[in-house]
Image (cartoon, rainbow, N blue to C red):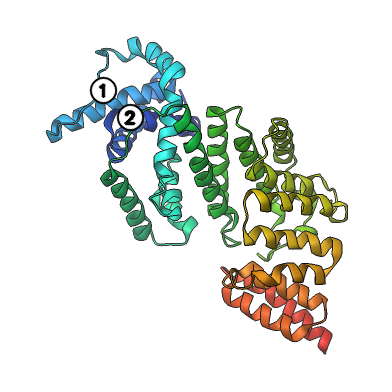
Amino acid sequence: MTDARALETLISAARPQAVGALLRYFRDLDRAEEAFQEACLRALKNWPKNGAPRDPAAWLIFVGRNVGIDAVRRDKRLVALPEEPVLSDLDDVETPLADRIDHGDYRDDILRLLFVCSDPALPAEHQVALALRIVSGLTVPQIARAFLVSEAAMEQRITRAKAKIAASGRQFETPDAVARSSRVGAVAAMIYLVFNEGYSSRPGASEAASVLCEEAIRLGRLLLRIFPTEPEIMGLLALMLLQQSRAAARIDGAGGIVLLDDQDRSRWNAKMIGEGLALVDKAFRHRQPGSYQIQAAIAALHARATTAGETDWREIELLYRILERIEPSPVVTLNRAVAVAKMDGPQAALELIEPLGDRLAGYFNYHGLRGGLLLELGRCREAREAFDRAIALARNPAEAAHIRSHLDRMQAQAG
């Protein structure tokens, strides 16, 4: 007998490999997903009585493939399928099928599946939604809650993404070494989008946010298994682990935002931090620094500081300078300004961010930081204007409440 939780874990772990293989067979996302779902239903009936197979992914691929072929025949559609050996009994084919997957196709199947979801022709939010549905297997209601949209809107978003991929006629050939190298960056960016969707979600939506962050980390681990020597993938996974390690300390009991300097560091997840720090060290030994590695190194410096006062802001500022060269962005400069303020004071930081005003006019964090710097300099009227603009751009009530606390403090000081 196999309990329900164990079955769910086995099926979830096998999903990317199985759906990826079925996508290769059928060249159709909907067909692959439907075949996998039917295979899962049969597994839920069969495995509790007979026990889980040695390789759940191989079992699901075999059953899903046969289910899909039967559906094609019923629909009288002419679908070109790759030639396969004639398979008879599941018990006879499970071992060789698993061996073939283990030693040949599965790596490219999973990569292909991730790449299809991160198709650059799709808007970023569609990439994330499709990956969560197809690769991670989250339900439409779960994804809709995470994005704060209706289930109907999310269903439509996923359907449109699938239709766009189907209409594009994207090739499903096995990617060669050059293609893998070009694709891995797109896949990594999609995974980090999934993570940020959860990490930056409104406080109070902890369950939905946690699901997205956990799925992104799981996908990051999967990608690292495919590219075990790629330092940027090590950096990506390390970055997500180190950021997520602070999740329990980011929100107070009333649902308000707790800034990094004010967080109770005893609530940080030591296991995640340990794994993240080890990955950072391993990545930098390759001496091929990239954006994710630099960001992970910055997060590592925060994680290594036992108190806010021990933070090595000079090293953080240097890393942001390197990141500006690797990946120039006004947001990177804005983050560097925080380190500059810690080292050289608010005036130096303000001078750094003032030229960013046009490009970051619609960015909440720009006006929030600018208001804080102006407040430190005693320029209260300008600070109030910046805070008012930040409140207007706040993405959720907690962000707005955080800025209002600055205004309340100003009023108390004035009174």
Q: Tell me: 130 left or right of 296.
A: left
Q: Is residue 7 visible?
A: no
Q: Residues within 10 Å of mark 1 (few under 14, many from 20)?
A: few
Q: Amino acid at mark 1?
A: Pro
State the count of labels.
2
Residue furthest left as drawn? 76
Residue 114 is drawn in which quadrant? top left
From the top left corner, tell me how far across and down residue 269 is, in percent.
Answer: 72, 44
Front residue of 116 and 268:
116
Q: Amino acid at mark 2?
A: Arg
From the top left corner, tell me how far across and down residue 334 is, in percent.
Answer: 69, 63
Q: Is residue 273 visible?
A: yes
Find the distance from the CA under tag 1 to the CA under tag 2: 9 Å
Front residue of 61 and 341:
341
Q: Residue under circle 1? A: 82
Front residue of 169 and 322:
322
Q: Residue at x 52, y 49 (%)?
A: 194
Q: Residues within 10 Å of mark 2 (few under 14, many from 20)?
A: many
Q: Tell me: 354 left or right of 111.
A: right
From the top left corner, tell me how far across and down residue 134 is, in percent.
Answer: 39, 41
Residue furthest right as drawn? 309
Q: Tell me: 88 left or right of 355.
A: left
Q: Counting residues from the N terminus, which is met first, the one under dot 1 or under dot 2?
A: 2
Q: Is residue 15 above or below residue 369?
A: above
Q: Residue at x 27, y 13 (%)?
A: 85
Q: Residue under circle 2? A: 24
Q: Tell me: 415 left or right of 138.
A: right
Element assignment for label 2: helix
